[in-house]
Amino acid sequence: MTDIFKKEDNMNWTAVCSTNDIPPNAGVCALVDGKQIAIFKIDNAVFALDNFDPFSGANVLSRGIVGSLEGELVVASPIYKQHFALATGRCIEDENESIAAYNVKLDGDTVLIAAEAQAAA
Amino acid sequence: MSGTTRLVVVGNGPVSHQFLETLVESGKADQFSITVFGEEPRPAYDRVHLTAWFETRKAESLNMVTEGFYESHSMIVHNDKKVSSIDRANKVVSTDCGTTAEYDVLVLGTGSYPFVPPVPGHDRENCFVYRTIEDLEAITEASKNGKIGAVVGGGLLGLEAAKALHDLGIKTHVVEFAPRLMAVQVDDGGGKLLRKKIEDLGVSVHTGKNTQQIIDGDNTTHKMCFADGEELETDLIVFSAGIRPQDALARQSELDIGERGGIVINNNCQTSDPSIYAIGECALWNGRIFGLIAPGNEMARVAADHILGGAEDKQFLGADMSTKLKLMGVDVASIGDAHANTPGAKCYTFIDEQLEVYKKLVVNEDASKLLGAVLIGDADDYGTLLQYALNGIELPEHPEAMILPSLDGTAAAGLGVDALPEGAQICSCNNVTKGDLCSAIAEGTHTLGDLKACTKAATSCGGCSALVGQVLNAELAKLGLEVNTDLCEHFPYTRQEIYHLVRVGKIKSFKELLEKHGKGHGCDICKPTAASILASCWNDYILEAEHAGLQDTNDRMLANMQKNGTYSIVPRVAGGEITPEKLIVLGEVGKKYNLYTKITGGQRIDLFGATVDQLPVIWKELVDAGFESGHAYGKSLRTVKSCVGSTWCRYGVQDSVGAAIDIENRYKGLRSPHKLKMAVSGCTRECAEAQSKDVGVIATEKGWNLYVCGNGGMKPRHADLFASDIDTETLIKYIDRFLMFYVRTADRLQRTSVWMDNLEGGLEYLQNVIINDSLGIAEELEAEMAHVIGTYQCEWKTTIENEDKVKMFRSFVNSDSGDSNVVFVQERGQIRPATDEERELGKDLIAVA
Ligand code: SRM
Ligand SMILES: Cc1cc2nc3c(=O)[nH]c(=O)nc-3n(C[C@H](O)[C@H](O)[C@H](O)COP(=O)(O)OP(=O)(O)OC[C@H]3O[C@@H](n4cnc5c(N)ncnc54)[C@H](O)[C@@H]3O)c2cc1C
Ligand code: SF4
Ligand code: FES
């Protein structure tokens, strides 16, 4: 399976769930160190973003629809439908409202999250 | 502020109103102080659609005057006041009751009156004409005590009146003096076919009948005695034997009058007194009266221009009297020289007695130009043929091909709209040329609905709507602006095409659809669309693993997400009927989980503020108490509102509550392109507001009237009357077909109202498909609906019975706690989401986690 990040050293990994807990091509939310993190599974790859939607001020992104826009994987906010890139947290409609992306990896079926935001999101 | 030129208008019919509107549109209305006199008790209404009064029986529905129209231009309007004299020397008009008005410019728009043949007995009681709303009210009243009605006159208006009598449920006869129906417009062959079609509907036709007297009937109110010795017993009589220009005022004031009546006008619409104009049906131009609205409107525009100083240099130069109408459900059209009176004219005729279609072309001597045409039973080619005739376009080598059916399936030899000159008048009612349409399209009007609204084309008689649609499509293509109808970047198809691919290819999942017909990963446009189509076709449980991720925000959790990420809960309360026990359950659940409760606009109860994890717990209690999902979250049937109906209400004529409950239970769970709302009212008072719904049902003494394609919301639209006095079985059959046809053909998120406004052929086409099964798909549609009904499940019941599914409703995949971000405050005794400020202050917050 894939690791989608480079720096694996000195990360604080937390096991949050099994890949089977995530419906295919959809998301769930995990609570890691008091932080709400949305985890998405697309085919066999996993991604992690803030669950907080800056446009509505509600914790809802894990419940958005995932898909692709011009080849880039994104999730659409379920409230006002802005898109965020799964890999980086970039907001497609308004870069100023981009959100944090988190390091995530698989160990077998187990999903592991590092709750520090990615450096260059 | 009103201006200095005193302008008086006598007669407040459609043409006078067009005149006033033209003045206002010119922006110069304020140069005048305007006074309008109308003999009828109400301001201008749409006489062309007079018969539509029967649909609502309300005068307001025909009103032509927008709110504030008179006031904002300080016009003084006298209704119910007949002008009885004009003093031309002193330039003053006066009414019977003594009101006077001085004028600098006078406009006569007095219209015409129905001609009643002076046979003895014509003035007996229950003898009517068909011209005003009051006439229709009187006819309706009389029809309650009569069983038989006769219309004298088999012309356009006579047949329209006959249809009205027929619809009122009385046995109807048409009595015509000439040897055939619609003698002015159609020839013998056409008349014969028309007669057959009308007789097929149950209306008796008597031609060549000269009424000599009307006396007491033996079994009915009247007996009509004809010159040939025959008699006809009838309870009421409607005279529709032609119109006469209303020129009494002009005669009295000694303006020039034609030999057979009519106020003589010149090309500027001025009468023999240059300060007096005459427009509409009272005016005689070049020895002719024009008994149609389009020429009247043109006169109104010409007169307005001339009065304003002639900036546009308009002239009235006659008008085309071609007509297309639907008479008693039969398409009839007549163009130009229908009787081949032009010297040297030749005809091509095609008759299909099987399909009951009659078509005739009249061409000039060398068959190069079209002079006229008659179409009966199928008038689809009207627009094209009219353009050939009006614009003198060269005919193809074999003109007959234009009316012959194509046997090999190729398109008939029609004329592309591209060939039309810019100046070609596409909509004669509103004087809209092809050029007008093209510039509106170039300026960004890209849908049929918007084009109609902005140019007014196709908004009066509707005869031109197919042609307007063709111009729109051709122009969009030409501008390279062909609207991209692809659903999204992942599917190069419209929703309608995808529906077809799914249905025909028996595609059962989004994955399969994407692999076979799409690309990429899908998105928040195509996924919910596909989810809806899959559900309409196969009706699987929508949270099956392969479907769950496709569902839009609300469907995903089977509840409506609110602004703070919590959800609302709306159990079904079919028809709005609910027992005290169930009300108590809702109250107790609301109290136990501290939910905000409110009565919705759809006659049921909404419980707000539940977190994701509470949803299955709350629903378990509701399902146990006998509630079902209300699908408030789905693009699917919402509610069927009801009024209390005949069970309790003193006016009700049918059990509207029972019907609403049955209908709601039948269609609950049906997934559709957009949400569906319905209502059933127990009588014509319409307390359930059915005419604002996608499907509206109103009880009548004889059954139900079915209305379709209404809308509340941001762009309200009144529903169209689709079928009258049908029984319950027919009602359900039509609704089944209607809904499935909508599901098949509408765009994504297109309500039935917008769908209808963009449907080529409009209501008539839809009636043909649903009632006459013109596409031969009625059975298929019914079978598809039967499948959906047969596979209904309460999505919440299925969910709470399945542990895996319940797991999808946790706030966190790795913790049982709730969302600490969700906080409420108390207001009017209930919770509501806290505002940002309240959060910051941190006072009196109620948290759920
Ligand atoms: C709850 C309710 C308001 C209320 O408290 O009364 C309501 C609430 C919402 N309406 Fe509504 N509408 C409600 C009756 C109506 C009505 C009245 C009716 O149905 O008789 C209308 C006008 C009638 C109509 O639709 O033709 C109405 C016209 C709309 C529209 C505009 C639709 C349109 O075609 O213009 C929207 C927006 C949309 O659907 O795109 C909308 C959308 C919504 C949404 C779904 C907005 C959203 O996405 O959050 C709201 C859901 C709130 C929730 O959680 O339940 N709601 N909404 C009513 C629920 C009725 C029910 O029992 O199911
Ligand atoms: C049932 C029906 C169906 C029709 N269908 C069609 C159709 O499909 N297509 C089409 O093109 N045309 C149709 N017509 C014809 C169309 O309605 C007329 O061409 C149009 O109404 C003419 O408008 P007008 O303003 O000239 O006259 P009118 O509509 O007759 O209005 C004149 C008004 O002036 C008032 N008036 C008269 N004398 C005085 C006075 N002395 N003082 C004050 N007020 C006065 C009258 O009461 C009347 O209200 C139809 C007509 C009827 C009755
Ligand atoms: S619509 Fe008619 S039957 Fe229904 S409540 Fe109103 S008045 Fe009574
Ligand atoms: S021609 Fe009558 S609406 Fe256009």
Image (cartoon, coloured by chain):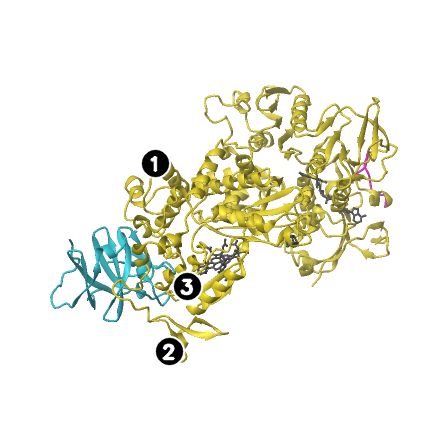
Relative vertical location of residue B775 with respect to residue B451 in this rendering, above or below? above
| Proximity of marks 1 and 3: CB atoms separated by less than 8 Å | no
> x, y percentage for residue B640?
53, 51
- Give the letter of the chain under mark 1: B
Amino acid type of the residue tagged 3 in the rendering: Gln
SS for tag 2? helix
The chain letter under disc 2 is: B
Callout 1 amino acid: Gly
Residues marked 3 and 2, same chain: yes
Q: Give the main secondary structure of the magenta stretch.
A: loop
**Label ID, residue B505:** 1
Residue drawn at point x = 22 percent, y = 56 percent: A19
Q: Quadrant of residue A23?
A: bottom left
Image mark for residue B562: 3
Based on the displayed image, in which of its 4 quarters is residue B705 positioned? top right
Q: Secondary structure at mark 1?
A: loop
Give the number of the mark in front: 3 or 2: 3
